[in-house]
Image (cartoon, rainbow, N blue to C red):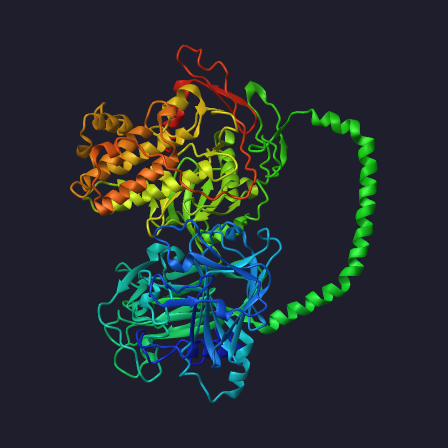
Amino acid sequence: MGRHHPFHAGGARVGFSSLLLAVLITSSFTSPFSAAEFSPRTSILLNCGSGVSAFAPDDQRPFLPDSASLSSSSSSVQVADRDPSPGASTLYRTARVFTDQSSYAFTVGTTGAHVLRLHFSPFSATEFDLFSAVFTVTALGSFRLLSDFSVQIPTPVIKEFLLWVDSGQVDVTFTPAARGSSPPVAFVNAIEVFTAPSDLIQKDSQQLTKLQSQVALETVHRINMGGPLIVPSNDTLWRTWIPDDVYLFSGVTSIKVNTSVSVTYQKDGTGSTPEVAPERVYDTARAMNTGGLLDPRFNITWKFNVSGGVSHLVRMHFYDFISTAAPDLYFNAYVDEQAVYTDLHPFTFTLSSFSVPFYWDSVVDDAGADGWRLMRVTVGRSAKSSPTKVNAILNGLEIMRVLNASEVAKKKKKKSLLLILMPSVAGVLVLLVFSSLFLSARRRRRRAPVAKETAAGPTSWTPMSAHGHGAVGLSMTTTSKLSHGTTASPRTPRVINLGLHISFEDIRIATNDFDEGLVIGKGGFGSVYRGVLGDGTTVAVKRGIAGGPSNQGYPEFQTEVTVLSRIRHRHLVSLIGFCDENSEMILVYEFMEKGPLKNLLYGRGGGEEGAPPCLSWKQRLEICIGAARGIHYLHTGHAQVIIHRDLKSSNILLGEDYVAKVSDFGLSRLGPSMGETHVSTAVKGSFGYLDPEYFKTQQLTDKSDVYSFGVVLFEVLCARPVLDPLLSREQLNLAEWAAAEHRKGRLAQIVDRRLRGTINPNSLRKFGEMAVKCLAEYGADRPSIGDVLWNLEYCLQLQETELRREPHEDSGLMPVPVPIRRMPSSNVTFREEERDGDGDDNGGVVAARVVDEESQVVEFTTSKVFSQLITHEGR
């Protein structure tokens, strides 16, 4: 164990500073109390930006108002989320926003190890867009905890640090960065500061105690091997432990094992304690999948993103509950292919005849470049293993980045030197710049006729720059004509410069080199992988198919980046970043745990093993309300209407608490300008959801989205595909069949059989009326999405309260305007699509014209349009 046993040098460099860190972290998280009994000497829990208390979402600890802890010189304001999600914790509905460098000052009363947790959950307030905030956080004057930090997903992010306090006070400072939002701001939603258990610190080492103030630790990964998610309410120090599945290098080399026998901690100080890790970590593990093989020769490996160029403390947790006798199990443990313990035998760490939980600490140094790197943690067979009993286990893992105060001081010295030299350097640069401008101007005057001639050549703007607002700043590319009407593919330009670019190498590491085992979805655009970024954020990575036919995915890729980088809403999926290096088309989104709505409505069939869980009627209404709020924001929350154009159940994603978010904006278009009624554009969408009026006339309006959403509503009600060729002709098309059944008064007969008898009749009647109105043949007869949202909320009220209404009160939809916050004015440009003005004079056959990514006008008839819409993804 790290505290009483010497570190195994192996290949990892471990010195006195490593021993210092190990003692620090051990002493900090060790206590004889259980989770329920542990009571820190100092515990400060703040609900930032609020004048009232709030409770933690998992463990119900009370967080108090923060104003008393602010330093007198702080420049801050309180902001509240005006449109919180129904399931959002009250702790994350407010924030303290700092407009200049500001600090909290906490009096902790005691010295020693303290835990600091910072909670961030951005939202768009009236005055500030917290999604755009970029800032730095420092503590104790010398530790830079977060540099140029930002949060671009609307889900809480918690940063945890372990600080050694030697003055009885903890100062935490927030400094906005100029390159972030305008005006520059920093923010925080909640703060935790509490004394870590310190009764097992080696008090006889005065030199150790003196040096501990020079280091701090940031938790990067905390993993429960072979087990489920452990939430703060089930942990002794209110921590979260993540399942290890996504980090495994190969899933076939290991199996999950667990024990139902209560874990016994050794009380003589030679093993782990409940504060080091709770029982739920130790009662599950990963073990080798030997499959009955004699003398198997493979390892179990996990891969993690960590910061390059810094040291990390790696803590491995072990508890041998698989051995049948004391001498059975020997194995090796490695970090970055270097042994940190050879011939590890669990019974070495106990004085009894049975195994006890223990841990092993190693500090691994890295002298590489800054940025992200991949750390490999491995357990495998030992030379001492019996050929018939080869195995290896790991129960839990923690990786913590080492923050060194002296390194921060060195950076400040370098910065000071730069400040001294900067005036001299700046003077030289100014002279060089003016000289270059003078020479460049002379050259331009001489070459003006040539430039004009070149401008008239075969050039074309890349898609989405057609409106020419200048807000996006797309580069121009040239194309060359080939025979038979084709065009050479242009070199793929950089899409946009919005600070969202993620390097291909970082994405490759996040997805374990695009491991097929991490694929969570496939479609016409490409594959979607589950990944973990270097800061521990779980993301969904959509990798487009490069070099496909006509490179059709690239305009959609550009459109999606443009739309999602300019708009933010709780019910729209957030774009974390993108990559367009080497013709790649990669989009990185926030990860939605529950996946597409479609998968939860119907899967492999109700009652079959692996079928999705049944959503209650209340859950379905809340999901529809969330999606409607997202669409309503697209239609009304921006300077110009944004029409999604591809609404369907597979494009409504669900988070952990079934919060619905609209996704996939590749086909989005700006709506009609002031004074116009529609946009003339080529027909695009998904078969079964496509607005028939839009298809016939090629005139796109926001009511086209309403039609598609009406199909989704019936999909939610009936839990069946929108097109099912196995059914009769009358039932093949869900929209037509459901509307016909509603006219016959048989709506209750088409409800998902799993919901029958659970829906309030008034709620069902109102829902059916609204869905049918959404499917009206002409857009003018359909309600607005605001009306749909109001009526969905009314359906939920009827379901929850069983409010009885008279028939005449429910005779129609009640158009009530829904208040919406408008974003600050910013232009979003889309690619231009042309329409054949004579499209309706072809004997009933509509001809659509689309400007593709190479400025080639492609014509196709109605039948060709439908043949494209019947592809796997319906695009």
* Position of residue 46 measured from the top left corner of the image (x, y, whole percent): 44, 67
Residue 149 vs residue 533, the one in the foreground: 149
Q: Residue at x 58, y 20 (%)?
A: 483
The C terminus sits in image quarter = top left
- Residue 616 visible to an observer of this rendering: no
Q: Quick check: 772 above or below 149? A: above
Q: Quick check: 398 above or below 679? A: below
Q: Quadrant location of residue 291? A: bottom left
* Position of residue 759 measured from the top left corner of the image (x, y, whole percent): 20, 42
Q: Is residue 426 left or right of residue 869?
A: right
Q: Residue at x 27, y 76 (%)?
A: 264
Residue 451 vs residue 756, the one in the foreground: 756
* Position of residue 365 measured from the top left corner of the image (x, y, whole percent): 53, 69
* Position of residue 652 measured from the top left corner of the image (x, y, whole percent): 36, 41
Tag count in the figure? 0
Q: Quadrant location of residue 736? A: top left
Q: Quick check: 636 above or below 727? A: below
Q: Is residue 808 left or right of residue 41?
A: left
Q: Is residue 301 left or right of residue 457?
A: left
Q: Quadrant location of residue 381? A: bottom left
Q: Residue at x 55, y 20 (%)?
A: 485
- Residue 849 visible to an observer of this rendering: yes
Q: Residue at x 38, y 37 (%)?
A: 786
The N terminus sits in image quarter = bottom left
Residue 572 vs residue 20, the one in the foreground: 572
Q: Quick check: 658 above or below 138? A: above
Q: Residue furthest bottom?
A: 204
